[in-house]
Image (spheres, rainbow, N blue to C red):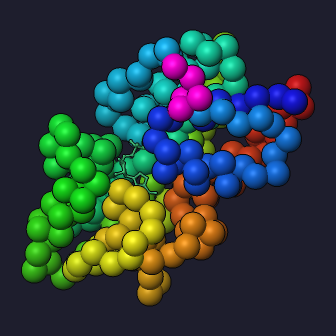
Amino acid sequence: MKALLLATHNPDKVREIKDLLKGLPVKLYSLLDFEGLSEVIEDEPTILGNATKKAYQMAQESQMLCLADDTGLFIEALEGEPGVFSARWAGPSCSYRDNRLKALELLDGIVDRTAEFRTVVALAAPDGIIATKEGIVKGVITTEERGEHGFGYDAIFEVGALTYAEMTDEQKNELSHRALAIQAILPIIETTIKL
Ligand code: IMP
C-alpha cells in the first residue's frame, strides 16, 4: 500500500484530515509519527507559500508523498488580519484562546463581523509540487465564544446558526474550509498514488 505523509505536527489537523481521507487506499502518517524531521519555518507571506514550502520540504526530507495544509482566518473589518499570522497572532507563545479573545476585543462594538477561513493544501513528491487547492468558507465572528468542540478559532467562527465549535467533528468536516480544500485535491491524490 502506498504511503502519504501529512506534513503537520498539529494533532487537531491530523484528526480532521485523517477523517477526510478515510477510504483512500493509502497508509496515512503525520509528523507525529516521525522524530527527527526538521521543523519547517512558516515565514512565507501567504498561506499558499507556506503550504507549498511545508509540502516540498517534508517530501524531500522524508522521500515520501506529502500533503501540507496552511490555514488562515481573514477578518474583513481588520483588513484581512490575522490571515497568514493566525497561529501566533496574540504573541509568540499564545494559546488558541488568547487568539480568540484578541479577535473579540478588536471587534468589540463593530457591526460588520464578516470573516472567512481559507485553507490551501499542497501535494508534493520529493522532486516537486504536484498540485495545490484552496477551500474558502465565509462566516461571521461571534460576540462571545460558543461551543466545546474543535480548536483554534472554532468557538468564535459562525457558519449558519452554529459556530464550528458547536458542530460535531463530522458536521464540521461536511462543510469546512479544510474539507473543501481536501475534496478538491482528492482526485489528484488518487491519480498520483496509482502511478
Ligand atoms: P496553520 O498555520 O495552518 O497551522 O494555522 C494557523 C492557525 O489557524 C492555527 O494555529 C489555528 O489557530 C487556526 N486554525 C487553523 N485551522 C483551523 C480550523 O479549522 N479552525 C479554527 N482555527 C483554525
Quadrant where the C terminus sits is: top right
Residue drawn at x 44%, y 82% is 162
Residue 116 shows in the view: no
Residue 34 shown in magenta: yes
Inspect this view and state whether residue 45 appears.
Answer: yes
Q: Residue at x 28, y 54 (%)?
A: 96
Q: How many marks?
A: 0
- The N terminus, quarter of image: top right
The image position of residue 181, as x and y in percent, is 60, 52
What residue do we see at 45% from left, 68% from top? 149
In this rendering, is residue 128 above or below 122? above
Residue 58, quarter of the rendered image = top right
Up/down of 55 relative to 164, above or below: above
x and y, in percent, of residue 63 in the image: 67, 14
Residue under the image location 77 percent in, 35 percent down: 27
Which is more toward the observer, 153 or 55? 153
Is 142 colored magenta in this rendering? Answer: no
- Where is residue 73 drawn, in percent x and y? 35, 56
What are the residue bounds of the magenta stretch?
A: 31-35
Q: Residue furthest bottom?
A: 161
Q: Nearer the viewer, residue 10 or 60?
A: 10
For residue 81, side relative to residue 118 (left or right):
left
25 is higher (above) or lower (below) than 172: above
Q: What secondary structure is the stretch in magenta mostly built from?
A: helix
State the image quarter where residue 91 is shown. Answer: top left
